[in-house]
Amino acid sequence: MTPDRRSFAGASARELAGLTGILVLAAILRFVALPTRGRWDADQGHDMLTLLELTQRGVVPLLGPPTSIGDFHHGVLYYFLLAPAAWLSGSDPVAVTGMIALAGIAAVAVTWWLARSIGGPVAALIAGLLMATSAAAVDESTFIWNPNLIALSSSIALAAAWRAWSAPPGVARPLAWVVAFAGAIATMHCHVLGSVLAPAIVVPWILDVRRRDPAGRRRLLIAGGIGLLLLILSYVPLLVHELQTNFSEVQAALAFLSGGGEPSSMSLPVRFLVVGLRVLAWPLVGLITEAPVAAILAAAGVIAAVGWRSAAADDAGERRAARWFGLTLLWTTAALTVAASGLATVVPSLPNDHYHAFADPIVFVTVGLGLAALARLPHDARVVAGADRTLPPLGAIVAGAIVVGIVGFNLVRQPPLISPDGGWPGGDAAAQRVLDALGDVPASEDVVLHSLPDFKSGDALRFPLVHRGASVPELDALPAYDGLPNVVICDDLFQEAIGAPCGGPAEDARVAPYGQRLIDRFEAAPDRWISVYVPG
């Protein structure tokens, strides 16, 4: 038998052609209509303001984006990772979103490699294809948000850890462990709950250290020390902030934990089941309330694949990887059940499945391993009546049908080409309309921006105004509001918290003490009203 000709890094030309096709498909799904596809709201405006300050004014941030589960922040490394795109583009949100899309495509390639190194070419093809077409993964690649880099950082951490851990006993790979630690650190910075991934990297490193000879053990311990140093260095900005603010972040985190975390009326077992269902099904079928039957089937398939490959895989490495993945998914579900009990309540308008985005590569690879094994099942070759050919393997038919079903399900559920709020072009157009209304206002004059409700930032409008050259200081930086133009951005989804409806009553009540008159009011996006006032 002629040996398979290898072309690059041990992969055949056919495998690389398949990977190329998958990456092209991933790119098409992520880059089509990119400017209008991603949502544009306060979170995106806040991140772009920080990047603008960093890359154009040299203001180095000490904290990452604010969390939604307490009065503390995510890691600041997220901003540094996006800074090159912001710097090169003059803080253009489309360029920053493009970098996030590239990260999503790279995550497909890394996940493909991880599946191939464990289960072979077929497992890689399936895992890569499922991640490339996943509606959830595409959505995570098409708008600006700190969790949207986790798919790449966590897949790098897992792939590098497996590269090191699967090495023969006489071959230590300390550099791979350093890369794994760096990927885990980036995951922790992009979302505080990404710290749940850390044990999945640290425990294999400990097991790898224990099985090495003295020389190899020493090299791996040095790698662990480098990883710890990287972790400490990555949080130096946070330390600087804490020293300046009497450890306000630590106090906020402790207050959140001592207060019981996120409230939940569900019992612990029920929360565990719901969280587990979301962790296992989200990458494959999306939000569980939109397709509950598909979600249950997907979760059952992942569990079956873990159990089957953990017990019955012929290759010892595949058995070990399947057990590693299974324990990681179990740990993830248990940890999030306690630390993020809000996941037990599914709110369609609250996309908090990003809490467990670091587990998505594990789900894709696990499904790839299971379906590849199904396709390899032995069968009785039977000759088709009247034809000189045999029936294809039943396992391969079933596996192919499942892949086609999952891919087709996701292709018809891709994110819309135009975000309901108009995306960044909609936000920029709203800012231009405000500036047109204030046409006689000197460019050097400050604009007062109010946001209703008070607890929601007005950065969805502040950034495009600043990006267009307007001066829009924070409210606490202005001595008075009555002699300046006042702009109010009002979110009608929070009408109960505001105490009055947007579109007039709420905004007029806010500016009433300042003697302002209305010159323009419009609905910039569904339930997002903007009102422009001037003195007099």
Image (spheres, rainbow, N blue to C red):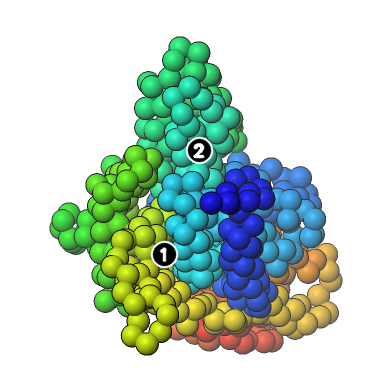
The residue that appears at 31% across and 61% down in the rendered structure is 378
Q: Secondary structure at mark 1?
A: helix
Percent x, y for residue 283? 41, 64
Disc 1 target residue? 283
Q: Secondary structure at mark 2?
A: helix
The foreground one among 283 and 445 is 283
The first of marks 1 and 2 along the sequence is 2
Q: Quadrant of residue 280?
A: bottom left
Gap in Å between the C-alphas at discs 1 and 2? 24 Å
- Tell me the amino acid under the disc marked 1: Pro
Disc 2 target residue? 163
Q: Looking at the figure, which quarter contains the C terminus?
A: bottom right
Q: Is residue 321 above or below residue 364?
A: above
The residue that appears at 29% across and 65% down in the rendered structure is 379
- In this figure, what is the number of numbered marks? 2
Pointer 2 local density, CA inside 10 Å: few below 14, some 14–19, many at least 20: some
The foreground one among 13 and 256 is 13
361 vs 39, left or right, is left
